[in-house]
């Protein structure tokens, strides 16, 4: 079924933000919801029988990295700067065909757990930008998922993006040759030429990795492209405390001020993490109409800190929700992300201000729609026909707030029966209607095997840098900051703590060896 056809979802219990539970039909035409009410005549529409099921808007994953989709369970819990050495820079090379497999693995996982739209900040290599971006977009197109791809690019060596003010050891040599900023802007322009307006479900976006990871020439060029094409903008901002110093050293001002000066804060721009922003920076984001994307699981995994969600919601800041990449989350399940986002806030502030499950659900839907710049996250006429039908065996639909709380805290996606994207059923009875899932699973297993076989190489790569990166991390964590975002203040590592860390990593080396212990 194409998005130009007509679809009728009949007899569902409607669960929509801001409204009571009610039994009604949903008509979609051309990929858009056109009518909601009881007793709608089907006419020539394809009918999806939904009696006894709950219809909700599709969940929205507003930040992930598709290249990590098969990295689940491969990465130790580490602070971000050390995590990068293990999870990103120590990985084996992969092909464009592998990138298709990775994106498809994530798309199927998300769709079958009720997530219909994603903002993918997937890394694309500058030397093969066109083929890799084509592979990622093609995977989402084939799966039937709605996706915005903001190819993650930067032109600076990773060690030039960190502050070494507290290092007693020399800064490591560059990991490779620098990338040409003008060439990256040209590649991104070609990406927009290829995909802007080409597909109803797919959207190209501008995606610098982070302000401190890009030269001013690259950032200025990408800002110009976004303005010229009217495209969305997505980047990481102040994920960790260590990035405060890194941004000040590079630009002489905070990353938020820098982005505002570039004109990159506007409705349709989204900023991942933002844990270490101060209140004035949050106010700037609100004033400019940008969206903050909260990634609770990866923030916990890397010990990055706690985003003050209550402050943001009470202050009128648009907040979305992301799973983040599987190397720092271990899955792409937005039900789990909502649960973590709800529970994590109990570590911050008075219980009277803890955001409850319905507020987190709305963040996922309404904030996610804002991050993608599309009419999503609602079952009202005019919204995209992205609909999830849930069996109610595990959840009693008595009233809306109780049902939402049950879904956020007790669901993992096993109740997902049917998923409709752009007016097309792409999942039925929990399985893709478009793909041979067994064949895709075989491709994924082969790639996952290769990734796991390379873990000893990752360990060796990581070991070369762990000393100096631990030193600069601990130095920056001990410095004063305008805000405190940790659940508790952790002292810098002494010799005993370093010895414990080495013992822990030694255990992991044994775990990552082969079964013969060789």
Image (spheres, rainbow, N blue to C red):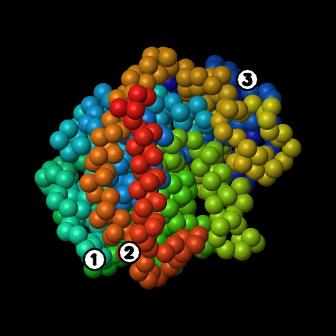
Foreground of the two, 91 or 455: 455
Quarter occupied by residue 15: top right
Foreground of the two, 219 or 513: 513
Task: Determine whether, in the image, residue 279 is placed left or right of residue 137.
Answer: right
Q: Please, is residue 145 above or below residue 466 in the view?
A: above
Circle 2 Cα neighbour tier, 10 Å, few/some/many (<14 / 14–19 / ≥20): many
Residue topped by disc 2 = 476
Residue topped by disc 3 = 49
Task: Determine whether, in the image, residue 56 is placed left or right of residue 449.
Answer: right
Circle 1 Cα neighbour tier, 10 Å, few/some/many (<14 / 14–19 / ≥20): few
How far is mark 2 from mark 1, CA to CA? 8 Å
Q: Please, is residue 444 above or below residue 477 in the view?
A: above
How far is mark 1 from mark 3, CA to CA? 63 Å
Residue 16: x and y in percent read 71, 47
Residue topped by disc 1 = 165
Q: Earlier in the sequence, mark 2 or mark 1?
A: 1
In the rendered image, the quadrant that contains the C terminus is top left
Query: What's the residue at 13%, 52% (across, down)?
Result: 177
Residue 50: x and y in percent read 74, 27
């Amino acid at each position: 079924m194409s998005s130009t056809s007509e679809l009728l979802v009949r007899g569902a219990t409607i669960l929509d933000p801001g409204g009571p539970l009610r039994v009604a039909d949903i008509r979609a035409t051309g990929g858009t919801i056109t009518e909601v009410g009881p007793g709608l005549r089907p006419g020539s529409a394809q009918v999806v029988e939904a009696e006894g099921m709950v219809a909700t808007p599709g969940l929205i994953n507003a930040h992930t990295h598709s290249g990590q989709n098969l990295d689940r369970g491969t990465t130790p819990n580490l602070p971000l700067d050390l995590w990068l050495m293990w999870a990103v820079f120590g990985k084996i090379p992969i092909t464009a065909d592998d990138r298709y497999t990775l994106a498809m693995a994530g798309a199927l996982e998300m769709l079958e757990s009720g997530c219909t739209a994603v903002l993918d900040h997937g890394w694309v290599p500058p030397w093969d930008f066109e083929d890799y971006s084509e592979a990622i977009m093609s995977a989402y197109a084939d799966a039937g998922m709605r996706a915005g791809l903001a190819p993650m690019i930067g032109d600076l060596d990773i060690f030039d993006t960190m502050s070494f003010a507290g290092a007693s050891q020399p800064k490591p040599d560059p990991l490779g040759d620098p990338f040409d900023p003008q060439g990256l802007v040209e590649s991104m322009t070609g990406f927009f030429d290829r995909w802007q307006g080409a597909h109803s479900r797919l959207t190209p976006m501008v995606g610098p990795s982070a302000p401190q990871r890009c030269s001013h020439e690259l950032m200025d060029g990408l800002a110009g492209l976004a303005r010229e094409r009217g495209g969305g903008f997505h980047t990481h901002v102040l994920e960790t405390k260590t990035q405060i110093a890194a941004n000040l050293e590079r630009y002489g001002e905070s990353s938020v001020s820098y982005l505002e000066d570039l004109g990159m804060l506007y409705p349709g721009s989204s900023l991942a993490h933002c844990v270490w922003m101060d209140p004035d920076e949050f106010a700037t984001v609100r004033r400019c109409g940008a969206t903050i994307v909260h990634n609770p699981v990866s923030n916990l995994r890397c010990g990055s800190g706690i985003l003050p969600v209550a402050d943001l919601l009470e202050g009128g800041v648009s907040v979305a929700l992301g799973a983040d990449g599987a190397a720092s989350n271990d899955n792409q399940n937005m039900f789990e992300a909502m649960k973590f986002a709800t529970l994590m806030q109990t570590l911050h502030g008075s219980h009277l201000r803890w955001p409850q499950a319905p507020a987190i659900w709305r963040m996922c839907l309404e904030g996610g729609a804002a991050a993608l710049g599309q009419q999503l996250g609602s079952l009202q006429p005019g919204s995209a026909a992205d609909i999830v039908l849930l069996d109610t065996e595990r959840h009693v639909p008595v009233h809306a707030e109780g049902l939402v709380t049950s879904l956020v805290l007790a669901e993992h996606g096993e109740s997902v029966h049917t998923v409709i994207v752009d007016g097309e059923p792409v999942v039925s009875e929990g399985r893709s209607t478009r793909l041979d899932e067994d064949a895709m699973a075989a491709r994924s297993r082969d790639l996952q095997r290769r990734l796991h076989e390379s873990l000893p190489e990752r360990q060796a790569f990581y070991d070369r840098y762990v000393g100096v990166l631990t030193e600069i991390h601990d130095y920056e964590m001990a410095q004063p900051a305008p805000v405190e975002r940790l659940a508790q203040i952790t002292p810098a590592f002494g010799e005993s703590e370093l010895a414990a860390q080495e013992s822990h990593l030694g255990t992991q080396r044994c775990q990552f060896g082969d079964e013969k212990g060789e």
